Structure formats: structure tokens, C-alpha cells
Amino acid sequence: MTDAKLEDFSLDITLKEEISEEDEPDIKKEEAVALYSRSMAFSISNGLVSPFVSFIALNMGATAGILAWIQAVANLLRQFLDPIFGRLSDVSRRRIPFIIVSTITWILPYAFLFWVKSPIYIILIVALVNILMSLGNPAWMALQNELFPARARGKLTGRVTWFGSFGSMIATFFTGIILTFAFEEIDYQQTILIPVAIGFVISVIAILPFRKIEEPLLRVGVKIEKETQSLRVNIKEVFNNKPFMKFTILYSIFGIFWTFSWPLFSIKQVHILGATALEVSILEIIFAGTSLIFILLGAKVADKVGRTKLVFLNRACLFLFPLGYIFATKIWHLYLVHFFVSSLFSFGFAGVNAYILDLVPRKKSGFYIGVLSMVTGIFYFIGTLAGGYSVEILMNWYSEAVALTIALAFVAGVRFLLSFMFLSLKEVPR
């Protein structure tokens, strides 16, 4: 934190009994079960379908531009409405209903992939999916902010992410490896209803533990005034929170060039290297596997030495992804790239989430996180479209392979330079 007044970051919570912070448990067992089960179930459901949406679109003949629109719309609508949904959860002082509805509905629109004949319609499906995701996003982060004590926030956010990574690995292993070996090369479009149905059932089971969780802001002994300030006042407060706005701006600017390369990776995997669904799945599994190994280590470091060093590491290592893709000539080269870079990325990731939660007041977590999501979502939208269309424009003069290399080299250089902005972040007193 800079020299901003500490009361801007007041937790606004007073307990009836004074208890030593060191004597308090990090989190109750039933709360942990609810959070970890939802995180794992969401990732399983997502892993059953999402990694192969671009694969289905490419098989339908999607251009780099259409692929960019699919990813850009996902980036925008997953986050653009977050301030609205976040404020609603703040005003109602309830997070769990938003989480439950979002968790059991977001996957259902993917069922329509079975009937589409053009990649254009995939854009509409992805739009609806991500609006339903957005419904629960700010409430999900706000609930963690209310349940996790600051002294253990890095460790606990790391655990939530760890269970999510474990779920992703299970899902991708099932869809990409077991089914492929069982049925050889699967037509994912024709079998899409199966993973959608499985994901829905898993999601319903995962939200059952929330029946035992009481809303943190409504608990006996928690003295928090109901949110009555106008939207205008809340917006002004957010913009006057200099540490929060600084992080939002830096994160968003970097986000343009983070998402710039997302459609480029799929083109390299499928068009240039001819990756099969099985090989794409292995890439996903490598990413999830490194998260399982390194994210908890990073979470412990985040609580001991601070968040900002890990935030910088998390951003700085990302230039290696597009750089590695440039030199990859075989799919196994990408295996090495994913293992090395995602290991560094995962180690620093818990620091990012913990730093965000450190910056926001608990009473208004939903709105603060919603604003961060909306702003970054807009920049992600711009970045993804720019990445996809940059290849199409360059292909007027070069082959697809050369155009892709130029675009990847550009984004690698910019990512490297922009990562040093994060060295200016200051720790928030806990």
C-alpha cells in the first residue's frame, strides 16, 4: 500500500469477543468443503467442454478472425457485467445464491454446440455461457475475501486454486485421453451432450455443501452496516482508492498482450503442428499438473514474504509462452514450454489472488472485484481481437506460419517490457 489512509482498507467487521488472531482457525471445515468442492467441480465441468470449443470451431473452418471473436466475446462477457452482479451481492449481503445459480447453469448453453453448423453460432453460445459465469464470479471472490483471514489468504486462495487445477486435470484426462483411446478420434461436436450432462450433474452435487454455510455478512456477532450508498458514491470511492486503481490499470494494460496471443496458440497447435485432440489434452494436463505441484508452494511464500514479488513473477514469466511457441516445430516441444512456463506461472498465481483480496474492503468486495473484472474484460476483448486479426492482416503479405511468428514475436517482446511495471506495486499491510 502507498501512503493512502489505512481506513480505506478497513475490514468493517467487529467480533463480540476479542480472540487472538493466531488462535483462530484459518477456516471452518464445512466452509473449506464447500469452497474446494465448488472449485473442483467448476474446473471439471469446464475441462469437459471448454478446451475443445476452439477445436470444434477450427474443424468447421473458422478463420483466425472468427476464432478471435469467440475468445474475445468470452473474455468480455465473462467479466463485463461483474460490477452489476457484484453490487447486487453487496446490497443483498448474500454471496451464496449467486454462486449456486451460476454454478449449475453456465454449462447448459454448451449443449447447443451439438446442432450448430457454422462457427458464427459458437460466438452466441459462448456469449451466453460467459454471462452465466459472470453471475457468480464477483460473489465467489467476495465470499473468499470474507471467509479468509488476511494472515492466511495466500495459503487458502492457493488451496482453492489447487483443487480447481486438480479438477481440470481430471476432466481433460477423461475427455482427451480415455475417450480418445476408447473411441479413437472422437467427433467432439457429436458427443458434446455427454460431457455437458456430466458437468451439470457434478455441478449440482458440488453446491450441496453450501447448505451448511451461513452468509458471512449475516452471521450473529458480525457488525456490518447494510450497503446503502448510491452507485455513484461507490464508483467514486473505487476510483479514489489509488492502490486498487493502480493495480487495475497495470493488470488491464498487460491483459491486452496476455490475451493477444490466445487465438494464436490454437492456430499454432492445430493448423501449424497438426495437433490432435489427444495432444491438445496433454497440454491442458501439463498446465494443471504443474499447478498441483507449485501453486501451494507459492501460496505459502505469498503469506511469508509478501504478494508483490509473486505478482511480478507471475507476469514476467508469461513472455516465455509466445517465445516458446515461435521455436516449437514439434508438438512435444510445446509440452516442454507448457511445463516450464506454467510452473513459474502457478508458483506466482496465489500471490495475485491474495493481493487482489488484500486491496478490497470486505463489505464492498463484490463491487470492487466486479469493477476490476469489467475493466480487465474490456482490455481482454481488445487484445484477443487484435491478436486474431493481426494474423489475418499479415497473411496478405506472408504465409500463415510467418504471419503467426511475427505476431508471436511482437507479443513476447511487449509482455517482457510491460512486466516490469509490476515492480512498482506496494504491499498492503495485513
Image: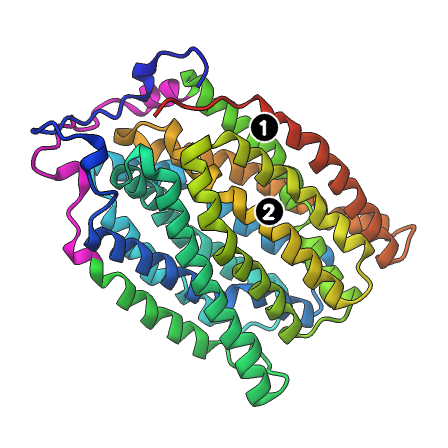
Which residue type carries mark 2?
Leu
Residue depicted at 26% across the width and 57% down the height: 33
Alpha-carbon span between mark 2 and mark 1: 16 Å
Residue at 52%, 70% in the rendered image: 172
Quadrant, the N terminus: top left
The reply to whether the magenta stretch includes residue 247 is: no
Total numbered circles: 2
* Residue 188 screen position, x and y as percent: 57, 77
- At a point 72% along the width and 31% down the height, the residue shown is 417
Structural crowding at the residue carrying mark 1, measured as other residues with C-alpha within 10 Å and reported as few (<14), some (14–19) or many (≥20): many
Which residue: 65% across, 32% down? 419
Of labels 2 and 1, the one closer to you: 2
Mark 1 lies on residue: 422
Q: In what element is the residue under mark 1?
A: helix
Observer-nearest of 181 and 125: 181
Q: Which residue is mark 2?
A: 344
Residue 188 versus residue 300: which sits nearer the camera? Answer: 300
